[in-house]
């Protein structure tokens, strides 16, 4: 009986409404150095770049640490996965030796400095961040 | 009675004192990271064993601790290794893999050394429980004819276009060590050469297709069987003798489709292994799973099945008793070899949950109903040949990455 009841409970929960609505109104911008002004990337390409694929030129993705709200926003809006699923993905990539996760900087301030110093890097910030002139926005989420 | 051996106790103590932390960069070039899992399980069967579990709660079938040091010489060249301490007697503890890695550009990744075999989606990360939702990945796919690593080289190419991303990986090498059949370590030194495979993965949005093909030449000799084979040849039973050949090619085909959304995920994976020798049956295994993500919680349901085809034995030897004692011993031995080869099928239904309670830790619980639809699925140990077995497997797990 226990086994018959559990699938119903599971199915009810499977069709429960989504829970990521809290982030709906906040936007994330994808930022790089103005030296890379010619670059056009689709959301899909940005997603793949941050998940470890190459987009044909050596851009180095830089991420904020797990637990950061901006990282969660980026994961939800660009990657399309929850934080824990992204963590699981990187555990699989890292511990199978396939791809290392993107370099991590500790704050949005550190992210801006890193993007200014390393001109081949690409990162993300909240849309209301104060972005210096030497950096350009290449993608803005909904 | 509860079985808690030393290593699991040490691991538990380690977890209790552990602070959530990330890979430690000891110097600019040296990075130490790792993972661990403590798994408890109980099988609701009074006399059978499944994947090491019995009707005694046990923490030492799948619990493990792994450390992965990695040293970068520069941006392109690094050396990585992984040491795993297993609590199970079935798995050898020690160096799991070690290789030299060269990434001439972000598109290419070349590796050489002792590598993990990338047969199925989770094969090379099978020990990293944190990376998948289950406590135990479906045994019907992941516990058949498995060896976890090989010596050789692999080349991988990644590319992301406007809407499609793909990854192509090819590898070549050899393997010498323990072989697993239906989750049990076979007590023979396995030797596999010309191991080669190709893995193609295509992603479009959150849809992912993985197709892979693997082949190898098996040179493994099972001492008792080869002795019996020589005797049969000597007596002129050539058909019977040749049906005991264990050397030949092995082919594995895998295909899987995954779809992920923010709130749910779906996955199907199918594998088929065929061998060029009669003593090893063809096996097909697959699973279908669906999951739901609610904040830090994941709920998932999986149906899985595996099926062995019958092995072709020769009927040249007369069934004992024939009145000739020597003849009867040979015939009995011959028919016993085939009677102990799996040729059944196993269905399983799993319901599980995962709670990501910290950034790098998760707790899991799952229940699996295991149901043999044809006896001798190969998974239940101590099983008699005729009866089909049913049991529930209850498991809880603590997963940690650092």
Image: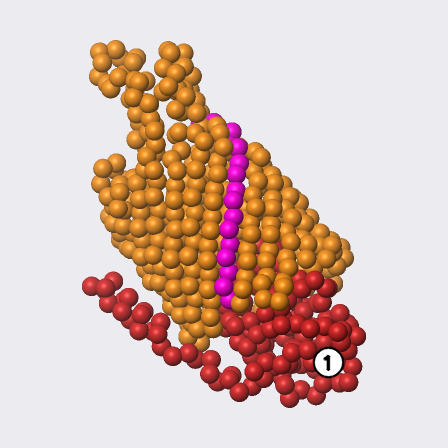
Chain colours: A red, B orange
Instruction: Pick the residue in front: B169 or B359.
Output: B169
Residue B347: x and y in percent read 30, 50
Magenta span: predominant SS is strand
Of residues B223 and B253, the one drawn nearer to the viewer in this rendering: B253
Asked if residue B199 lies left or right of residue B236, the reply is: right
Crowding at label 1, few (<14), some or many (≥20) Cα neighbours within 10 Å? Answer: some
Residue beneath disc 1: A136
Chain identity of mark 1: A
Residue found at the very far front of the displayed protein: B162
State whether residue A32 appears in this view: yes
Residue found at x 34% / y 50%:
B305
Residue B146: x %, y % from top left = 47, 43
Classify residue B167 by image quadrant. Answer: bottom right
Determine if the magenta segment contains residue B211: yes
* Placement of the C terminus of chain B among the 4 image quadrants: bottom right
Q: Is residue B9 visible?
A: no
Numbered marks: total: 1
Residue B139 shown in magenta:
no
Callout 1: helix, strand or loop? strand
Which region is colored magenta? Answer: B206-222
Q: Position of residue B100 (x, y in %)?
A: 69, 48
Task: Please state which of residues B313 and A105 is positioned toward the viewer in this rendering.
Answer: B313
| Whether residue B298 is situated above or below residue B230 in the rendered picture | below
Residue drawn at x 47%, y 80% as measured from the top left: A20
Rendered residue at 71%/52% (across/down): B102
Position of residue B393 measured from the top left corner of the image (x, y, whole percent): 31, 55
Give the quadrant of residue B314. top left
């Amino acid at each position: 009986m226990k086994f018959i009841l559990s699938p119903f409970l599971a199915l009810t929960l499977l069709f429960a409404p989504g829970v990521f609505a809290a982030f709906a109104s906040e936007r994330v911008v994808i930022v790089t150095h103005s030296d890379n002004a010619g670059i056009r990337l689709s959301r899909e390409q940005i997603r793949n770049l941050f998940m470890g694929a190459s987009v044909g030129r050596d851009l180095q993705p830089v991420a904020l640490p797990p637990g950061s709200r901006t990282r969660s926003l980026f994961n939800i809006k660009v990657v399309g996965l929850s934080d824990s699923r992204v963590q699981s993905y990187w555990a699989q990539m890292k511990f199978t030796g396939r791809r290392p996760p993107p370099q991590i900087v500790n704050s949005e301030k550190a992210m801006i400095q890193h993007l200014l110093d390393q001109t081949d890097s690409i990162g993300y910030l909240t849309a209301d961040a104060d972005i210096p002139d030497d950096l350009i926005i290449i993608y803005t989420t909904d | 009675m509860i079985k808690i051996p030393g290593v699991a106790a040490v691991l538990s103590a380690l977890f209790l004192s552990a602070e959530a932390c990330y890979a430690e960069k000891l110097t600019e070039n040296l990075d130490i990271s790792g993972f661990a899992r403590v798994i408890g399980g109980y099988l609701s069967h009074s006399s059978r064993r499944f994947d090491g579990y019995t009707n005694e709660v046990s923490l030492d079938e799948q619990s493990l601790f792994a450390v992965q040091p990695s040293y970068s010489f520069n941006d392109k060249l690094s050396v990585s290794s992984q040491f795993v301490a297993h609590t199970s007697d079935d798995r050898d503890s020690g160096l799991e893999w070690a290789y030299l890695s060269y990434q001439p550009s972000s598109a290419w990744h070349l590796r050489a050394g002792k590598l993990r075999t990338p047969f199925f989606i989770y094969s090379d990360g099978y020990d990293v429980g944190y990376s998948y939702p289950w406590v135990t990945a479906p045994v019907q796919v992941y516990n058949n004819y498995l060896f976890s690593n090989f010596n050789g080289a692999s080349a991988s190419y990644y590319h992301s276009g406007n809407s499609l991303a793909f990854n192509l990986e090819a590898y070549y090498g050899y393997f010498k060590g323990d072989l697993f059949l239906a989750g049990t370590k076979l007590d023979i030194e396995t030797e596999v050469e010309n191991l080669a495979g190709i893995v193609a993965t295509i992603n479009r949005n959150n849809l992912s297709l993985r197709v892979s093909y693997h082949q190898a030449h098996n040179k493994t000799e099972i001492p008792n069987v080869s002795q019996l084979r020589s005797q049969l040849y000597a007596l002129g039973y050539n058909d019977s003798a040749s049906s005991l050949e264990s050397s030949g090619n092995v082919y594995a085909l895998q295909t899987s489709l995954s779809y992920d959304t923010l709130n749910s995920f779906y996955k199907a994976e199918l594998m088929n292994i065929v061998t060029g020798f009669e003593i090893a049956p063809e096996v097909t295994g697959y699973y279908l799973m669906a999951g739901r993500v609610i904040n830090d919680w994941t709920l998932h349901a999986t149906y899985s099945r595996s099926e062995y085809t019958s092995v072709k034995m020769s009927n040249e030897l007369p069934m004992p008793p024939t009145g000739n004692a020597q003849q009867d011993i040979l015939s009995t031995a011959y028919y016993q070899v085939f009677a102990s080869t799996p040729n059944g099928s196993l269905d399983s239904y799993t319901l599980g949950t995962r709670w990501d309670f910290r950034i790098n830790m998760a707790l899991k619980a799952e229940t699996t109903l295991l149901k043999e639809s044809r006896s001798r699925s190969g998974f239940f140990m101590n099983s008699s040949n005729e009866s089909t077995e049913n049991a529930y497997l209850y498991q809880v797990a603590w997963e940690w990455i650092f």
